[in-house]
Amino acid sequence: MASTIIRVHDLHKKYGDFHAVKGISFEVMEGEIFGLLGPNGAGKSTTLEIIETLRTKTSGLVEVAGFNLDESPNEIKKIIGVQLQTAGYYPNLNLTELIALFSGLYNQKTDPVELLSLVNLTDKSKAKFKELSGGQKQRFAIATTLINHPRIIFLDEPTTGLDPQARRNLWELIQFIRAKGTTVIITTHYMDEAEVLCDRVAIIDAGKVIALDTPDALIDNLVATGFERPKQVKNANLEDVFINLTGHQLRSEN
Ligand code: ADP
């Protein structure tokens, strides 16, 4: 039985008079892909950034790997991988140089060749960040979260704006990272993404957790209420056509 690696209890965040997070509680188990799922404005990023030590909370308890956020934020920073703002990608440096720079900042020994190969960007090692496609940019951003060999990585809407192939490639990468033992916490407003990728999801709406379970259990519970989806008339959809025509394989422009 996996142990709890993140514990959030009765978390609140107010921006002035606006109550954005209204008593959120959940636990993330070590080694799982946990999703915070909800519409724009639900409070997902706020919750994530509080756990990442990037935003202050109004009240509530947050523990990461047994470290209390109020007492040991620096211990937490050491074991988590956070996506850097793209503004931090110095425009004159190529991908290899950027990884070397970040490794130095983190005081870590990281082999840029190995890391770029992990995220399938070997052939872009001498390219600048701005020269990458949307999917490549996201894969590079994920690579940067791995520089300090974290136990947990945080991904905030990593596939927003990507085409279907690039999304699927990113899902595979996230699953691969988890298979190597890293816990992943991800926010998304794509339901299909959460269904494919997440072991468990917390559905957040207007600052509250309104459901928390495995995608399968959430769907089974709905079906048990007598809910029935309108009958599917076709066995494929336009996305299937697109993927089938353009290929599943990772392409360099992704
Ligand atoms: P999500 O990630 O689910 O889209 P956010 O956590 O970004 O939601 O935002 C939750 C709510 O808090 C939104 O209504 C947003 O406008 C508000 N909000 C977020 N950041 C700030 C801020 N710095 N100041 C004021 N309101 C904010």
Image (tube, helix red, strand yellow):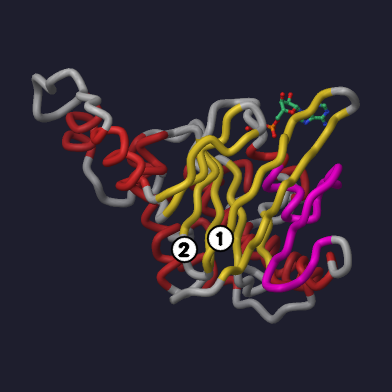
Please state which of residues 124 and 27 is positioned toward the viewer in this rendering.
Answer: 27
Please check the rendered image and state whether residue 92 is part of the magenta-colored stretch, yes or no: no
Q: Most extreme residue toward the front, as rendered?
A: 225
Residue 133 shows in the view: no
Q: Which residue is mark 1?
A: 28
The kind of residue on which mark 2 rests is: Glu
Instruction: Please provide the residue range marked out in magenta.
Output: 47-69
Do the residues bearing badges 1 and 2 touch, measured as CB atoms within 8 Å?
A: yes
Query: Where is residue 95 shown, x and y percent of the image?
Result: 62, 58
Quadrant of the snapshot with the C terminus:
top left
Q: Residue at x 70, y 71 (%)?
A: 79
Q: Quadrant of ligand 1?
A: top right
- Total numbered circles: 2
Q: Name the amino acid, label 1.
A: Val
Label 1 packing within 10 angstroms: few (<14), some (14-19), many (20+): many
Q: Where residue 36 sits: x, y (%)?
A: 54, 43
Give the left or right position of residue 247, taking residue 51 as reference.
left
- Horizontal side of 109 relative to 60 (left or right) equals left
59, 197: nearer the viewer: 59
Residue in view at x 53 percent, y 70 percent: 30
Query: Which of label 1 and label 2 is nearer to you?
Result: 1
Residue 110 image-quadrant placement? bottom right
Secondary structure under the numbered disc 1 in the rendered image: strand
Is residue 95 in view from this perspective? yes
What residue is pinned by disc 2? 32
Quadrant placement of the N terminus: bottom left
